[in-house]
Amino acid sequence: MNSAPGVLDRRRFLRSSGIAALAIFGGGALAACTSAVNQSKGGGDDNAQPVKGGTLNYGVLVDLVPANILTNTGTTPTVVGLVFESLVRYPHDKLEPQPLLAKKWTLAPDGQSITLELRDDVKFHSGRAFTSKDVEFSLRTYADPKWSAQLKSTAAAITGYDTTDPHKIVLTFAHPLGNIFDLLDTAPILDSETIDQLATGDKIVGTGPFRFVQRIPNQRLVFEKNPAYWVPERPYLDRVELNIISDSQAQLNALKSGRIQFADGIGYRDNENLDKTDDFRAIRFEGAELQLYVGANVQDPALAEVRLRQAIAYAIDRDRIITEVFRGAGYTLNLPWPKSSPAFDEARNSRYARDVPKAKQLVSQLPKPPKLPLAYNTAYSTYEATAQIVQANLAEAGIEVELVPTENATFVKQLIGAQFPGLWITDHSWAQFVPSTLAVSAYPFNARKNASHYESPAYVAAADSAWKLPQGTGPDATRAYQSLSDQLLDGLFLIEIGARFYQYGSTRKLHGVNWTKRREGVFTETFLV
């Protein structure tokens, strides 16, 4: 297993908790955009000199589902990263917000309000000036259940908006929000004048470096350079085209032939081989880990029995999945937290080490379970490979499953709507943020309504206790996260497999690729030579 190189260790994270109750000041226009990320960038020779112009042809496995634009699923992170911006941005390796559309801010000592000073030189792609009212509109929209945004509960906890000054906004909260910067990093600033057309995909208007130009469903999305972007002389590229190439081998062939320069769906083994060549490379989105898991609908009579879920947890060969499917680009987990998280706990994380005899013993205590459906998303080959290993692992323990291949749009709908009848395999995100965000926001984990139909007053209480802290770090937060972890291990409605680093295939002619913690591509500094 490979651990994440360069990630922030837990003690360093805790020492960085002084963000609350302090004013954070931004630098100049360019620094606010590029230094906000402040990480190593992927692609080509880092010593290459920027070149203006050109088109980035980018292969993506799935088309945009416009109604899912705020869900962080499928291709939405790519589109959001091109068109939209948020108020702050986290760097890859820590939870220290950096200025973006907000220049500086002050979080009240009691954690129940924040004052943000906004840039006064930002315009939407329509030419309209960005003001504090746009922040209010965007956060209220993000809180609207219609959009199924994963941090909507945190947005809904904002009870007051003071927009008297067009370049300053004061947000008041119903209670302290230890994850407020997660929301400010995540929620895109939306255009109120075109919001209805955003849901249909007819217009996608933001303040970001690229403007939406065209969408041909299941074929292509086209974006052009924003000539009025607030960062001078950026972006370098004239155009970005997202080409829907729904087969990983076809993406690989398109990359090698030069039809595309960047690809999101090439398999781990092929990326491993690309990295050994002179002309291509794999770019690993470090700091934006995805966590692979098996979900269980606990309304199913067999899966309602926690001992069966424990048997599944003991039976899974996590090491094999990380080694074979992901070529070692990750590490095994029993809990969702990556190694950079303040909630990461090695002892708790090893509770369900692979133990087939233990799994068999648990199964023997129960009535023979029926054949269980195990759904996976067919858009990504890694899910099928993982499902086949899990199927074989569970058979060893006396648990029979039937694989249910499910196309992407249907799979996402079932996840958001909690419609899986039995088991499913997919990734979750958000664990790389403040830990409380996962338990009060993410579809699989939300303590009040989750994809597993799992209900537990103790889990709700643990999630709320972690969420309502004035700060997301420090001794009180650590204790809260330990309680939250114990609830997840005891309830086991989700069975973690491991963290994996998302990888993209790239030509070495591509330089300056960056990303957010949500895997949104940041192409402000990207260029081709």
Image (tube, rainbow, N blue to C red):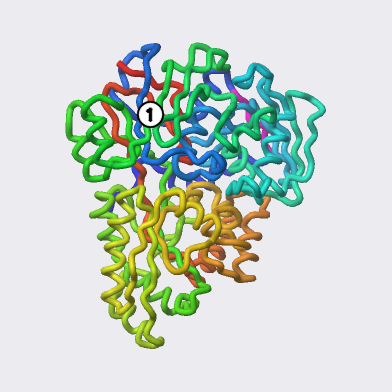
Which residue is painted at 68% across and 39% down in the image? 139
State which quadrant residue 161 falls in.
top right
Q: What stretch is highlighted in magenta?
A: 21-26
Farthest-out residue, right: 164
Element marked by disc 1:
loop
Is residue 25 inside the magenta stretch?
yes
Which image quadrant for residue 127? Answer: top right
Residue 261, percent across and down? 30, 26
In this rendering, the answer to whether 38 lies above or below 439 is above
Q: Residue 373 in the image: state x and y as whole percent.
A: 39, 68
Q: x%, y% of residue 491?
A: 51, 71
Residue 93 higher or lower than 405, as above or below: above
Q: Please name the residue that numbered disc 1 is placed on.
A: 41
Q: Is residue 69 left or right of residue 426?
A: right
Q: Could you tell me residue 346's position as x and y percent? A: 40, 61
Which residue appears at 41% of the width and 46% of the height? Answer: 289
Front in this rendered view, residue 445 or 395: 395
Residue shown at 49% from the left, 11% from the top: 233
Above/below status of 211 relative to 199 = above
Could you say which is closer to the camera, residue 408 or residue 117?
Answer: 408
Q: Is residue 70 above or below residue 189?
A: below
Queried whether the magenta region covers residue 53, the answer comes back as no
